[in-house]
Image (cartoon, grey):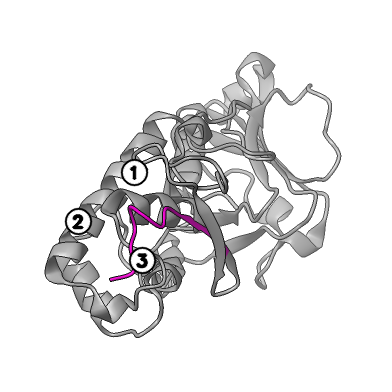
Amino acid sequence: MPELPEVQTVVNTLAPGIVGRMITGVSLLRADVVRSPAPDLPDRLPGRSIFEVFRRGKKIVVRLDDDTAVCIHLGMTGRLTLESPDAPLQPHTHLTITVGRTSPARCAVDNAHRCQLRFRDPRRFGGIWCLKRYDEAAGNLGPEPLHMSCGQLAARLARTTRAVKTALLDQKLVAGLGNIYVDESLYDARIHPLIPAGRLTDQQVRRLTGSIKRILHRALAAGGSSFRDYVDADGRKGDFQKLHRVYARAGLPCRRCRTPIQRTVVGGRSTHFCPNCQRYE
């Protein structure tokens, strides 16, 4: 499932192509991908301009000029790409949003400046929400890890006895982290994934806060991690999977100490760690 770096990369590559432009047409090819009761999107969205595109947690938020928003979660196999309206429609494309120039008159006549936002999701674990206000996307999500202070993380971890791996996957505790970047951050901080979150020392929490930010910045610079489905809005895959230290490397030597990386299951999630660098203490 795409996590913070992948979703942010989609936002970064999507925004230049659609912000400030007017929606000229919407085609909802599968109605059940809209997850909340909402007005009919093909009737509601045309004529609105796109004010901004941003990420909250693992969701992409397209804010319109009237402060309503279309919120998109990619799920496991979702793709949100920007393509020519004339490009062949791929199977499992559930929504297309056509945008043109900011001027309605030009939108109607200048096809060279039209493009189409397409949401494709073969397994349909993703979804679309139509929000009355764009700030509803925040919901009850925790703080964004790139802007989170050590004190914020310490206070949240101190309130739970769950394994630190499980706690960090809780979107109410920290927004945007998932299996890949929790494993990589815990390795970078030399913290065993099974240690109860509330038992971490101040020094460990400081180290973990720094590691989370460092790993996320590295992943963003590499365009995220691509294993199978994830691509950015231009259809390009990420490269951070080539730099993973533990995730999906079970049995391979640790890049620091050469001890074989181990895989276990924590809270129902596959978890990778180095038993030497991340000792349970």
The span from disc 1 to disc 3 (Cα, nearest Å) is 15 Å
The span from disc 3 to disc 2 (Cα, nearest Å) is 16 Å
User: What kind of element bears circle 3?
Assistant: loop
Does the magenta segment cover residue 197? no
Quadrant occupied by the C terminus: bottom left
Question: Which span of residues is magenta-colored?
Answer: 270-281
Does the magenta segment cover residue 279? yes
Q: Is residue 56 visible?
A: no
- Give the class, few, some or many, for how many residues have Cα within 10 Å of label 3's Cα (few <14, many ≥20): many
Amino acid on which disc 2 is placed: Arg
56 or 185, nearer to the observer: 185
Residue marked by disc 2: 207
The numbered disc on residue 189 is: none
Residue at x 37%, y 71% (from the top left corner): 164
Q: Is residue 256 visible?
A: yes
Q: Is residue 18 above or below residue 257?
A: above
Q: Earlier in the sequence, mark 1 or mark 3?
A: 3
- Give the class, few, some or many, for how many residues have Cα within 10 Å of label 2's Cα (few <14, many ≥20): some
Q: Earlier in the sequence, mark 1 or mark 2?
A: 2
The span from disc 1 to disc 2 (Cα, nearest Å) is 12 Å
Name which quarter of the figure residue 176 lies in: bottom left
Spot occupied by residue 54 in the image (x, y as percentages of width and height): 42, 47
Residue marked by disc 3: 174
Query: Which callout, 1 or 2, points to the residue nearer the camera?
Result: 2
The numbered disc on residue 215 is: 1
216 or 133, nearer to the observer: 216
Query: Which callout, 1 or 3, points to the residue nearer the camera?
Result: 1
